[in-house]
Image (spheres, rainbow, N blue to C red):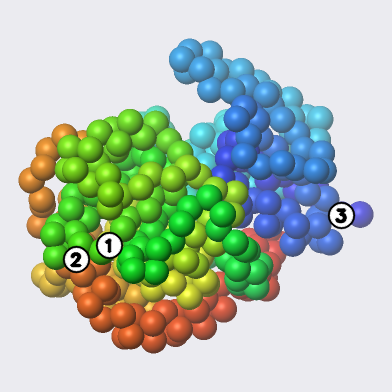
Amino acid sequence: MKKKLVLFIGGLNFGGMERVAFIAKELLAKEYDVTIVTLYQQSADYEIKEEYYNLNVPPSNKKIVTFIKRFIKTAKMKKELKPDIVFSFGMYSNYLNILSNYIVMKKPTTIVGIRSYDWLTEPFFAAKIDKWIMKHADKVNSVSKLIAKDAEKIWQIPRNQNIVIYNPYNIQTIEQKSLEVVDDFEFENDKYYVITMGRLANQKGYNHLIRAFSKVVEKHNDMQLLILGNGDKKKELEMMIESYKMQEHIKLLEGKKNPYKYVKKANLYVLSSLSEGFPNALCEAMCIGTPVVSVNCKSGPSEILFENDEEFIYEDKNFYIGDYGILSKELVSDRQYTKKEISVSEKSLAEAICFAYENKQQMIEVSRKAKEHMNKFNYDKFYEDFLRILK
């Protein structure tokens, strides 16, 4: 008889955690009886044909009441489903996964995931409580080597308990989707398109990217920036674009069910995040064969763009030409959407984008190697690693 595995996620949004959970469910179906469990399904992006378990407690302003409701329903879910293993994605789900074990008769094996570097430095609740939660998991899945290394220091997670599993990519599927026709935006032949995609949130650093791009356009007037995504910072970004008089050069496009066809049409993909875990969008652009520029945020980009990333130390250079893309300085975080002064790290990003524009043939060759490199992150490797942590 198959063991019962619960994959516990927040909602049904277009996001890295959700994508990985659905891929895991599909791949592990032969070995396990897998159930997806969500906290809520409000404003769902994904359509799931098969059944899943919904706690049905959406976010609200009454955060304590919401947490208590979710805690009670998580325990109820464990009593009903009687899972052998519960693998949670997201710090909120991790909390519920660990705490609910104290009020269920049969405690399942509990695996928690560290999916973003800022979870280590920006406590979900309080630093000591976060540390206590993580130490009470049976296993921890870190999504990058840097996260695993620093989690050992910050949360004192034993090395043999903390397993790195990189995100998986179906290169063939991504390539096929990228060949679909774009019918809601016109890519002009005489323009050079820079593209990025993700939530319109502070963490994605789009305010920094817009400031950097304003410097790029001063030098190369035929460049266009496309930002694909939805989020609560849309108005601020629109006002920022207007204040720089960049309406002709920067377009905010909504989130797309198939963003790959837009990335395929673009000349360059840029990642401007302040923090990541293992940036899916960057890897997906590499799968498509679009050249990439990324800031050196924690964590992921240096591990992705350099063959021997453990030997790489970012010295005081504006940017590095890596094995598989360009890496510019880590952005100095701010949440300013009105200031116009360009920071040193934003100038670094602008120079990296200009270099890519001015060295198109070199970037095409680098992107060819990057596409081959992405075979390292295929479904078979992910399946083997996931089975290893489960067993």
Residue 365 lies, in percent from the top left, at 39, 86
**Quarter occupied by residue 50:** top right
Residue 250 lies, in percent from the top left, at 30, 50
Does residue 261 sit above or below 128 in this rendering?
Answer: below
Amino acid at pointer 2: His
Query: Mark 3 sits on what residue?
Result: 2
Instruction: Give how far apart the Cα atoms at labels 3 and 2 are.
Output: 59 Å
**Which numbered mark, 3 or 2, is in the foreground of this view?**
2
Label at residue 223:
1
Give me the residue at 81% from left, 35% from top. 81
Does residue 292 sit above or below 297 in this rendering?
Answer: below
Left or right relative to 290: residue 178: right
Residue 231 lies, in percent from the top left, at 43, 36
**Quarter occupied by residue 391:** bottom right
Q: Is residue 231 visible?
A: yes
Q: Are marks 1 and 2 in contact (CB under 8 Å)?
A: yes
Residue 59 lies, in percent from the top left, at 53, 22
Left or right relative to 51: residue 210: left
Amino acid at pointer 3: Lys
